[in-house]
Image (cartoon, rainbow, N blue to C red):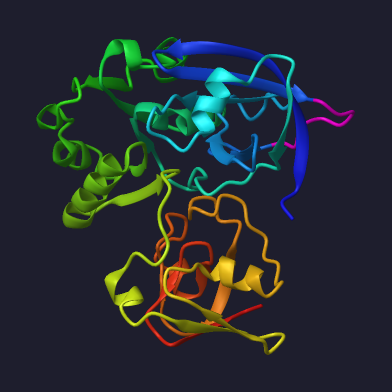
Amino acid sequence: MVAKQKGLISAMRYEAKGILSVEMVSAQADDLIPFSAGGHIDVFLRDGLVRQYSLMNDPKDSNRYQFAVLLENQGRGGSAFVHQSLRVGDVIEVSHPRNNFDVVDGATSHVFVAGGIGITPFISMAHHCRHNAIPMKLYYCARAPETTAFVDHLTPLFGENMLVHYDGGDASKSIDLTELVASEANAQLYCCGPRGLMTALAEVVELHGGSLITEDFNPVGANTDDEASKDGDFTVVLQRSGLTVDVGKGQTIIEALKAVNIDVETSCEAGVCGTCVVGYLEGEPVHNDVVLMPDEQETSVALCVAGCKSKKLVLDL
């Protein structure tokens, strides 16, 4: 089971059009679990809704959590619940913090590329860099000033090392990523925002060189790879117990395991949080998650969204 703690909603405020910040303190005798820069929590809402939000306050400010939620009219219901139903004084459950987007030790400078609500993890990371006198720079991409949150908070952190780029929702007016990568050739790059921005930046970095880390809370689907799904079923073997479980076409590994009463710890079930990542020993998984780095994919798999090219996948379970 995911370790949980109870938080009391202590403040809520609109930071920009459609962007609501939420502050919570501990609803229990103990303090909230400390977090590191770039970390996030699972927020447990109603009717089984679980959403992941980056913690954006200074990690040294250990008596509270702050996160922000963009209202998505075409979303899956989580943002609508936060905006329309969550209120100051409510008590909700959240997970202990996790971090798949940590500040890289040893980098001489850090360059953050944010798109829209993807700015949030960079606020805590900026505080970390500021405390440790680490050079940093921010490229903040947004549609328009009225949809751009936290500029007043970011300005004293970054000073002149912050560029805000407005594209008016027109892709042809997007920031020049090739120029960005060329001008920041020796920096550690980070990107969070719409998947299109992250994909485009990753392609430029692959072509021209550089080091890039991304964080993606956009949900992904399972068994979406044509090569993984064209042959249908495959079998999962649990190495430690010797059990075998058949996974049907269109079924996730998690669903197949739960169907035979094998419990695996999960949270988002969308390939974005990393809770269900386990090691594998044999087989050719298809990695549909956005958590594992390429080297990690050689030995680990996110069970909630993974497909399989081979007929058998042996898990370290």
Quarter of the figure that contains the C terminus: bottom right
Q: Position of residue 258 (x, y in %)?
A: 65, 68
Residue name at image x 69 percent, y 42 percent: 95
Horizontal side, residue 62 vs residue 173: left or right: right
Tally of marks? 0
- Is residue 87 one of those drawn in magenta? no
Q: Nearer the viewer, residue 221 or 13?
A: 221
Secondary structure mostly seen in magenta is: loop
270 on left or right of 22: left
Is 31 colored magenta in this rendering? yes
**Is residue 129 visible in this depiction of the protein?**
no
Q: Name the residue: 25% across, 21% down.
A: 143
Q: Residue 290, image x and y in percent?
A: 42, 54
**Residue occupying image coordinates x 44% and y 24%:** 71
Looking at the rendering, which quadrant does residue 289 occupy? bottom left
Give the magenta part as a residue range.
Answer: 27-34
Residue 39 drawn at (x, y percent): 57, 40
Query: Residue 280 falls in which quadrant of the image?
Result: bottom right
Q: Quadrant of the N terminus?
A: bottom right
